[in-house]
Image (tube, rainbow, N blue to C red):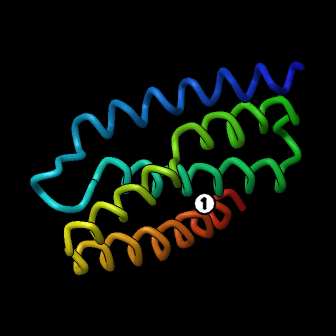
Amino acid sequence: MKNLLLVFVGGGFGSVLRYIIGKYLNNTENGIPYGTFLANIIGSLLIGLILGYALKNNSLSSNQTVLLATGFCGGFTTFSTFAYENHLFLKSGDFTSFAIYTIASFVLGFLAVFLGMFLAK
């Protein structure tokens, strides 16, 4: 039950922060949804840092890891919004934005996790 509460609290904070970033950076008129993109890349970097630090130093408790990695990062990042935004690109025939957004999100997301893990070591 304690882990559920930790995920709930961390996820709530992450979701609110993602909402704020999306509100100011996502604009349907300018193509790429920069808010979602930024949240997913920053979240990838953070989970790499958090889990890398937890593995290296054994200094984060399992409760802290659940709160930060599963809760906050899970609430902050969003695959469902990413998938929906790609659906909109395809529906409107904007294949260029679809390709750029999809490829950049995957490549930079993976690189951000690896960078976070590297920086934590």
Q: Residue at x 56, y 56 (%)?
A: 44
Residue 108 horizontal side relative to residue 51, left or right: left
Q: Residue at x 66, y 21 (%)?
A: 9
Residue 59 horizontal side relative to residue 73, left or right: right
- Name the amino acid, label 1: Gly
Nearer the observer, 53 or 85: 85
Please name the residue that numbered disc 1 is placed on.
116
Residue 51: x and y in percent read 74, 52
Question: Which quadrant would residue 100 be assigned to in this image?
Answer: bottom left
Q: Relative to 45, does residue 12 appear above or below in the rendering?
A: above
Residue 24: x and y in percent read 22, 36
Residue 18: x and y in percent read 42, 37
Nearer the observer, 91 or 119: 91
Helix, strand or loop for disc 1: helix
Q: Quadrant of the N terminus?
A: top right
Nearer the observer, 111 or 90: 90
